[in-house]
Image (cartoon, rainbow, N blue to C red):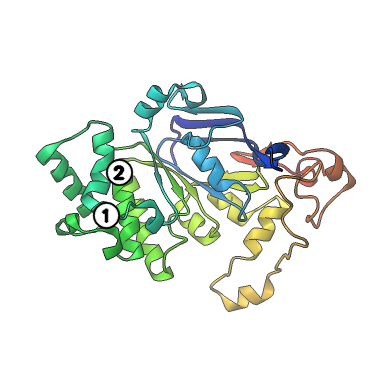
Amino acid sequence: MPVSETLLEVRDLKIHFPIHSGIIKRRTGTIKAVDGVSFDIQKGETLGLVGESGCGKTTTGWAVLQLHKPTTGEIVFNGENLTKASSGQLLKMRRHMQMIFQDPGASLNPRMTIGEIISEPLNVHHLASGSKRQERVSYLLEKVGLNPAFINRYPHQFSGGQRQRIGIARALAVEPEFIVCDEPISALDVSIQAQIINLLQDLQAQFKLTFLFIAHDLSVVRHISNRVAVMYLGKIVEIANRDNLYESPRHPYTQALLSAVPIPDPVKERKRQHIVLGGDLPSPANPPAGCHFHTRCPLVMEKCKAAEPPLVSIGPGHQVACFKVSDP
């Protein structure tokens, strides 16, 4: 991939949610959903964000679009610091940033026709009206593989895959530069998932889109992403180019995740080692001291229990947060 300019910069992002209990709702703790995450996304690329459920992937994606207000940290989009922007400035910026949600059934208003759903962003941003708005909606429906004649139908009249296509059309309505794809295929049948992935890739090439692709299916992430970031308990533990990460994972957590991905070769599958992690994912309300992964790591050292490993570069575009790798 050729060198291009940075579209999104995330710096030391932290999102902490208070825990309240009792009749007077006294604050008794903090959930550290995202705890110091930093990454860049270049124009035109797809950054895959992977990890177990509960690691903070979706919260990070929502924070990038300011749907969650960061506790601390900075998010800079096209040179504009979103964390310091006013509500009016954010409204203007949101034309350039959109989201495709995980559950197409829950993210579409059942009382609105698909024509109304897709045209709503056009109304909010005052981009088209009358016949031009109608033309734009029909054009978008064709682009996502749906018949424009369906414009007056309601979401319940469509399958899950078709509803996700409607969600994609809605995201494209305002001609965004950047789209957060929040597990866009996990709620769909396996037979439909490949169609949606191929559609996203075609649209990315046609409209020069940039994606943050959040998923837990590592096979899908490898297919669509240029670079991959691995999250564990609110922190990025490894980030690298796709091929480097899948062929030479360095963090023990990344190695464990990839060892669980089936290989379509029975001979190789029988020979390779599967890494089974012990214990459960710790609670983000009470993360372990030092390296958050040390309670489950097969390579744990005493140093890991006391100090937090920094995310350091170990090669071109490859960063790892692990003492065993950076300071063996």
Using residue 312 as the reference point, say whether residue 106 is left or right of it: left
Contact between labelled residues 1 and 2, with CB atoms less than 8 Å apart: yes
Residue 149 position, x and y percent, is: 14, 58
Number of labelled discs? 2
Q: Residue at x 43, y 59 (%)?
A: 185
Badge 2 local density, few (<14 within 10 Å), some, or many (20+)? many
Q: Secondary structure at mark 2?
A: helix
Residue named by callout 2: 172
Mark seen at residue 269:
none
Relative to 129, is 248 above or below? below
Residue type pointed to by label 1 = Val
Q: Is residue 241 visible?
A: no
Q: Residue furthest left?
A: 131
Q: Residue at x 29, y 59 (%)?
A: 155
Residue 305 position, x and y percent, is: 85, 44
Using residue 302 as the reference point, say whether residue 177 is left or right of it: left
Residue 172: quarter of image: top left
Q: Residue at x 43, y 37 (%)?
A: 2
Residue named by callout 1: 144
Q: Residue furthest front?
A: 23
Residue 179: quarter of image: top left
Q: Which sits in the foreground, 168 or 227?
A: 168
Residue type pointed to by label 2 = Leu
Quarter of the N terminus within the rendering? top left
